[in-house]
């Protein structure tokens, strides 16, 4: 687990290991969420990069009898 420090300008530096693992680049946008008293940063990706990210997902869903 990594620890970061909040600067006087309320900035944080994402540790190198995490940047590399997530493929973050300078200037990339991150969505900021508050969830259960914590802050989550979610990298925003261009729609073009999202193409095919669900490939291989199991689409077999058991349906209730009245839904067929």
Image (spheres, rainbow, N blue to C red):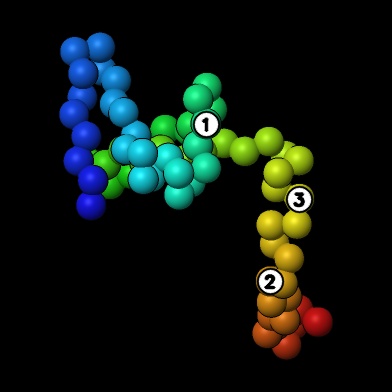
* 68 w.r.t. 7: above or below: below
Kindly report which numbered mark, 2 or 3, lies closer to the viewer in this rendering.
Answer: 3
Q: Residue at x 23, y 46 (%)?
A: 2
Q: Is residue 34 visible?
A: no
Q: CA distance from mark 2 to mark 1?
A: 28 Å
Q: Residue at x 72, y 81 (%)?
A: 60
Query: For mark 1, does the 10 Å Cα neighbourhood hold few (<14), some (14 to 19), or many (20 or more) residues?
Result: few
Q: Nearer the viewer, residue 60 or 40?
A: 40
Say which label, 2 or 1, has the lower sequence index.
Answer: 1
Residue 44 percent location from the top left of the image? 57, 36
Would you name the residue on which mark 3 appears?
51
Give how far across and how far down residue 11 sits, in percent: 29, 20
- Of mark 2 and mark 3, the one earlier in the sequence is 3
**Image position of 42 (left or right of 49):** left
Q: Nearer the viewer, residue 8 or 15?
A: 15
Residue 12, horizontal then vertical, whole percent? 29, 26
Q: Which residue is the site of mark 2?
A: 57
Q: Which residue is the site of mark 1?
A: 25
Q: Confirm or deny contact between disc 2 and disc 3 (CB under 8 A).
A: no
Query: In the displayed structure, does residue 1 sit left or right of residue 64?
Result: left
């Amino acid at each position: 687990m990594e620890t970061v420090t909040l600067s006087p300008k309320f900035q944080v530096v994402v540790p190198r290991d995490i940047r590399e693992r997530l493929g973050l680049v300078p200037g990339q946008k991150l969505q900021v969420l508050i969830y259960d008293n914590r802050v989550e940063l979610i990298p925003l990706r261009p729609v073009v990069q999202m193409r095919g990210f669900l490939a291989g997902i199991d689409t077999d869903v058991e349906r209730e009898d009245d839904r067929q």
